[in-house]
Amino acid sequence: MQTPAAVDYVRATSVAHALSLLAQHGEESRLLAGGHSLLPMMKLRLARPEVLIDLQAVAELRGIKIEGDEIVVGAMVTHAEVMNSPILTEHYAIFREAEKVIADPIVRNKGTVGGSMCQADPSEDLSAVGSALKGSVVIQNASGMRTVPIREFHEGPYETKVLDGEILTEVRFPIRPSSGSAYEKVERRVGDWPVASVGTFVTVKGGVVSDCGIGLTAVGAEHFCSPQAEAFLVGKAPTAENIAAAAEIAAAGCNPSSDQRGPADYKKHLAKELTVRALTRSVAASQGD
Amino acid sequence: MTAVEEVPVSAAGNPIGFGNMRRVEDARFIRGQGNYVDDVTLPGMLHSAILRSPYAHARIKSIDASAAEALPGVHAVITGKILEGIPRPDLLGNNFAWMPTLSYDTQAVLATDKVRFQGQEVAFVIADSHYIAKDALELIDVDYEPLTPVMDAKRALDPDAPVIRDDKGFTNNLIVDALGKTEFESGNKEETRAAIAAAQADPNCVVVTQEIMYPRVHPAPLETCGAVSYLDKVTGQLTMYTTSQAPHAHRTVYAMVSGLPEHKIRIISPDIGGGFGNKVGVYPGYVLSIVGSIVTGKPVKWMEDRSENLMSTSFARDYHMTATIAATKEGKILAVEVDVLADHGAFNGVAQPTKYPAGFFHIFSGSYDYPNAYCKVKAVYTNKAPGGVAYACSFRITEAAYVIERVVDCLAQEINMDPADLRLKNLLRPEQFPYKSPTGWEYDSGEYEKTMRVAMDMAGYDELRREQAEKRERGEYMGIGISFFTEGVGAGPRKDMDILGLGMADGIELRVHPTGKAQLRLSVQSQGQGHETTYAQIVAHELGIPPEDIEVIHGDTDNTPFGLGTYGSRSTPVSGAAAAIVSRKVRDRAKIVAAAALECSPDDLEWTLGRWSVKGDPERGKTISEIALLSHSSLELPEGVEGHLDATAVYNPPSLTYPYGCYICVVDVDPGTGQVKVRRFIAVDDCGTRINPMIVEGQVHGGLADGIGMALMELIAFDKDGNNLGGSFMDYLLPTSVECPNWETGETVTPSPHHPIGAKGVGESATVGSPAAIVNAVIDAISPFGVRHADMPLTPANVWRAIQGNPIRVDMAVE
Amino acid sequence: MEVSMTINGNEITKDVEPRTLLVHFIREDAGLRGTHWGCDTSNCGTCVLWVDGEPVKSCTMLAAQAAGHQVTTIEGIEKGGELDPVQKGFVECHGLQCGFCTPGMIMTARWFLDNNPKPSELEIREAISGQICRCTGYKNIVKAIQWAAENPATNEVTA
């Protein structure tokens, strides 16, 4: 089996401690969350940090709670906890639907929300969820903390707004009563990265869409979303024609690459098809409130 | 064949003979007490790692291993140059850098002049730990001069294609096989072509031609390949613990490769975590572990990573086939021709009997009654890993069964005939057996229509077709696919079949101890097939000894007789027969001993299970257990009769056996995404006598999962730069519990007339028969969109593109 | 660095490199070979064991991360010579052939049934969907787990 290069290991006991360890060990140190993105890369020797700072004992980074009109998810919350969270399930079906198709049940016990967001894989499902819901992340450093909308969080593949010496501490999602949400993913096999995924939420008031979010991943959508499709749909009746037209716009804004998961024309088609399906189910779910 | 109800049950609750019996092997595996090669630790053992080429085709200008050698904990770094410098007075090459393949080609142990596939072995590091060995790999500096690789088999014979095997002085990439030919042909060529031409000209006939690819896939057993080798310098004994499906054959090959005397080589296959043909060949890593032990004087362990397994060990298939089928418009098949371009990779390492360079592919004429069939197979080198025969293929019968069942469905579509009706119209009839096919195979027995009707009943075939019609009205797309396959297994008669000159007969030994317990020593090698249980059942069936009193020993060449190992579903047909024969020898000896003890003539005795007794006076008799003690006692035996109760046998099968089956698959396809859901899979197998039905079903289940994998997701493709796109389990996708349906299995039993217990073997049947059923089902589902064929794997992308009329070429990178 | 953990109730302390993967610590340093490895990319599941009672792919964890925790391996499932119903179910239902995936499957199945004692077939299939078997085609593994769910008490099974 492949093995990592030599590395040192320390365990942080608090966010402040983790920040001081990052400062102490410098830019060749990496935060270790669930380890299910970082360790595979280290085994392939694509990542070679000198020090790993393990966050498993930092209690402040755990837990899911409601603060005002937002749901707050700690960075070290696992995919399994997201999937089974009564709070998240109560407010948005999209979380459970997405988590059921992320990785596999065993990996979900360890992989974390913060780890996945910071890994920033261009096919990351949680990025589509976060973008769809117009969520935000909180980043902490030695001087304080700042909030960054998820739609501004990604700088490029595997690159985010988290700088050296900083920690993403939580992810926040606005609560939207009477909205409906859904997640659609096409994968070659259970547990695979998406060929394409779309997640949406819709709020319908007075027979028209009052708010919606369309998140897409694995298809080269800028910031994992389509504000143009959202803008088109808001104020319109959630008919099949309008949904199809919005999906057309969302797909047009994608720039997928061909790879062994599929050719670009197919992925572009999926961007449209899955947007239609996710929006349709989101609308149906919203009217159920 | 004994029906299950008639078989007596032992004190431990096991059938004394055939029937369901819990497996003896399970006790250690459920406790995590299996002993696999990576579990083996010898005193002073060192670890190793192989440096592999990142390029598919490149000249090696220099290798500097000095930094690696200097790393603390590194004992040695071996390169091709060092191996070249070790002379070897043996038959198959003149230095250690090259070794023979099972197709009489040579393969580099470590690259010397060039690297010829991505992942090829370049250097071997021996170190105190696996971690240090991996560290050392990064310190070896190799200066490569990249060359243009040949990645498209269809372009390998272009005039301007780079020559891969310049080491052999070749001037092109055409493979010369073990028989000295560049093309393998079988069947009646002239009559077949005449029949096809006549059908072309006849308005009442049709001719359908279809290009059908069976892409490159990989057996991917869950345990990778490896070895622990120890050459004891004092005794001269080489002991190897290794993942080998054929320990005795490997022993002979190592004798030929290393120059070490064969009686000083001991190969031990402990528990093996799956073989599927991946563990038949001899890999450079095994040879390097031996070299490592020679160089260091210590045991050396080599265990490959999964990426090494997928990128360098024996792949399977990679056949570009063009099939032409001629038939009347009423569906009577007249002729089939198949032309094949075979991609063998950079070294010709296909593993099959010497006289069969295309394996048993020429059984492609299938299960149908028509007199004209012809195939020709041409093979090329490409800059890919060597192999080709693996992954439960029964020596290329996977390719053969797939092409005929696929093209028969293409025919059905062309003449607008139900594929079940088309098959029923053409299936061989019971009175035609033994049946000599146009390509020379003699099928032993079969009741094909009966088996097919069982499958159709289980599936509710007519009801499924009604459901399909209704769904199509609503714009829903379900498909029903049938596969009827015949395979030939149990290689084989030694006059026809040998591997590297070793005839494919199997030895066996049975010893019955004084207290009536027995030990059976096999030459075949279980990798999960349950031999420790089923072979005890065969002896129990013949001798009446309870199976729990029979120990089955296998896997150690010092403790077992010579034989050719387990692959190609050969164990039951060959060693299973041997087990019956050797048991009967013991039974015959027991009769003489019983007669001596009962003071009568052996002709006065009759046998009931476990006992010889006097005809007409059944109270006077001796059980096998009593006879065992008597044969070891002071009882005087007749002149010329030896004591004890042991026997050996070498079984040379008279012919192959021909298991067959009918499979029906039901799928639902989402045309908006191309996703395929396998709703049901019905599998009716006929493998003759079923020694342990529970184990037979387990074998079938596993092979059916292979079909799901290959039909829908498994693929090793390459890009034009030579990169292997299936080199990890993230890319080489294997089916999980979610993609596999709840298999519905059934059986018919048509014994083999020439096998001592009528058994035919079943290990690979489901892998052979299932892919066509699934592909046929998917194509059936999307045929309303005008699709006649699309190549495996039918990923969502491939299905969607097929629906658009623009199918994906699967062996190259997706564009 | 010194790494201490409890494995199957026994405290073990070894001096290992920080980069040592948990699967190697279990196999080589603790000498428990029942946990296997079969891939490089956390896909195959032959390395599944429990950390603090929850299944984890031990090839994707450092031993250092497990320091101070309770690890349970296949060797710790049998209690006082009594096989767990999951182990019995695998024998009863022919849920294994080569045995290589079996320890990981048993570990996941036991945890799954502890949290879902009356599962549906689909739930069972989803629970083991992160682990590969190349031999059984999964049907008998599912049956074995169903058997264990239906036979939670001690039964007369010899293995």
Image (cartoon, coloured by chain):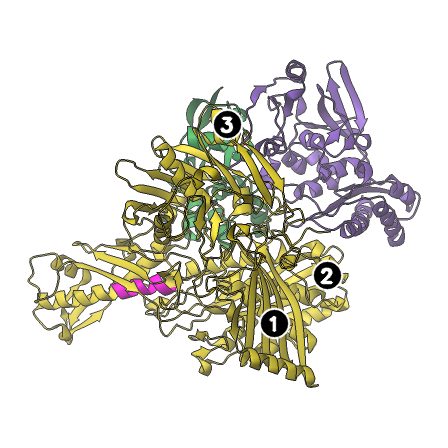
Q: Secondary structure at mark 2?
A: helix
Q: What amino acid type should be assigned to the residue bearing mark 1?
A: Tyr
Q: Nearer the viewer, residue B142 or B618?
A: B142
Q: Nearer the viewer, residue B170 or A74?
A: B170
Q: What amino acid type should be assigned to the residue bearing mark 2?
A: Ala
- Which hue is chain C drawn in? green
- Residue B599 appears in view: yes
Place residue B523 in its image quadrant: bottom left
Magenta residues span B573-582
**Labels 2 and 1: the sequence-earlier one:** 1
| Horizontal side, residue B703 vs residue A191: left or right | left
Reply above or below: A2 against B699.
above
Place residue B533 in its image quadrant: bottom left
The alpha-carbon separation of the residues under discs 2 and 1 comes to 26 Å
- Which hue is chain A drawn in? purple
Q: Nearer the viewer, residue B9 or A145?
A: A145
In this rendering, the count of numbered labels is 3
Residue B211 in percent (x, y) is at 65, 66
- Which hue is chain B drawn in? yellow
In percent of the image, x 64 and y 23: which residue is there?
A30
* Disc sitting over residue B461 in the figure: 1
Q: Residues within 10 Å of mark 2 (few under 14, many from 20)?
A: many
* Disc sitting over residue B66 in the figure: 3
